[in-house]
Image (cartoon, rainbow, N blue to C red):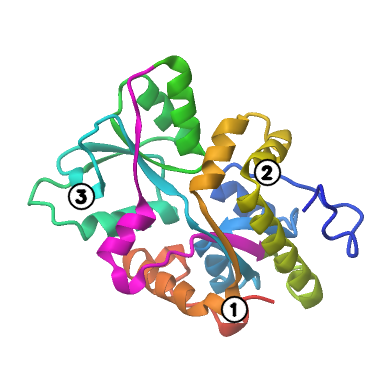
């Protein structure tokens, strides 16, 4: 969107900024330092329910979490009984989804996976590369980054075993879709419905282009995020389900997810479903 000047009708300065953690994103939003942001789908719901009138414009990410293992006999999350799993998530959406998925697996008593919480994804990658971990759950593009670095080092093979979303569909067929991340508009811009619609439409166009042109998109991403190598970005694009849909059109799927989070971790969404005006411009 920056490189194509997709919002040239509305601004002559469209800037891309990279945030490092949901906590940092919360600070940037609170300070009104950013107008629109990609975000995990629970964060705007949490902010709206705390009285900050942000809106969720779309959901574009439906599959982004991967189980990676050194064991060729691991074919899915159900094979992790009694094994240690590195998890670089503490309280955020992926952690809640993982806990819910593992609770649904038919593990024998005392045979549930042992979750080893790491400081962040880079810590988890380092443990895997040095042989101190055998199984890890990573969000793209860090899963592809791990596979790339392992190949460069000539390490023992790593296997991209199963996406959390595929395992979720098996365990919860009545709630098969996981609207995990999208674009939100900050409270000081949320009143501008025309601008929000323009952002949502431009984002959908750009996401579709990226999915159809993975290598060109990867090269573009690398220019803005140089520490990510092009092959890892391209791989991540190819295995990530990018499907940008207006939040208003998928409100039932979002509310299913929010109700699940409300049962497992109420503070993740602020304790209740967002009001109807929250969903889209």
Name the residue at the left extreme. 109
SS assignment at label 3: helix
Is residue 176 a member of the stretch shown in magenta? yes
Residue drawn 80% across and 75% down? Answer: 194
Direction from residue 71 to residue 162 in the image, left or right: right
Name the residue at the bottom extreme. 276
Q: Where on the picture, by quarter, is residue 231?
A: top right
SS assignment at label 1: helix
Residue drawn 38% across and 57% down? Answer: 165
Is residue 164 a member of the stretch shown in magenta? yes
Q: Which segment is the magenta one? A: 155-184
- Residue 279: percent from the left, percent from the top? 60, 77
Direction from residue 225 to residue 69 in the image, left or right: left
What residue sits right under mark 3 in the picture?
A: 78
What residue sits right under mark 1 in the picture?
A: 248
Q: Say whether disc 1 or disc 3 marks the residue closer to the N-terminus.
A: 3
- Which of 96 and 140 lies nearest the eye of the viewer? 140
Disc marking residue 217: 2
């Amino acid at each position: 969107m920056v490189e194509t000047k997709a919002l040239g009708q509305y601004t002559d300065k469209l800037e891309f900024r990279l945030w490092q953690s949901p906590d940092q994103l919360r600070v940037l939003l609170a300070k009104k330092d950013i107008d629109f942001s990609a975000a995990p789908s629970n964060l705007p719901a949490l902010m709206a329910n705390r009285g900050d009138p942000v809106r969720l414009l779309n959901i574009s990410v439906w599959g982004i979490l991967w189980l990676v293992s050194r064991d060729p006999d691991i074919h899915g999350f159900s094979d992790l009984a009694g094994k240690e799993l590195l998890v670089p998530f503490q309280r955020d959406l992926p952690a809640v989804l993982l806990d819910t998925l593992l609770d649904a697996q038919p593990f024998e008593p005392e045979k549930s996976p042992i979750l080893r919480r790491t400081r962040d994804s880079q810590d988890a990658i380092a443990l895997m590369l040095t042989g101190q971990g055998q199984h890890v759950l990573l969000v793209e593009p860090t899963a592809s980054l791990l596979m790339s670095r392992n190949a460069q080092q000539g390490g023992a093979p790593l296997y991209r075993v199963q996406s959390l979303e595929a395992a979720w569909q098996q365990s919860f067929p009545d709630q098969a879709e996981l609207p995990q991340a999208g674009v939100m508009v900050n409270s000081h811009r949320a009143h501008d419905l025309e601008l929000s619609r323009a952002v949502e439409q431009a984002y959908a166009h750009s996401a579709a282009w990226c999915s159809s042109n993975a290598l060109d998109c990867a090269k573009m991403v690398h220019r803005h995020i140089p520490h990510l190598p092009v092959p890892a970005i391209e791989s991540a694009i190819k295995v990530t389900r990018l499907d940008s849909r207006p939040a208003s059109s998928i409100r039932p799927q979002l509310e299913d997810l929010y109700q699940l989070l409300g049962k497992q971790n109420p503070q993740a969404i602020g304790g209740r479903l967002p009001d109807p005006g929250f969903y889209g411009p």
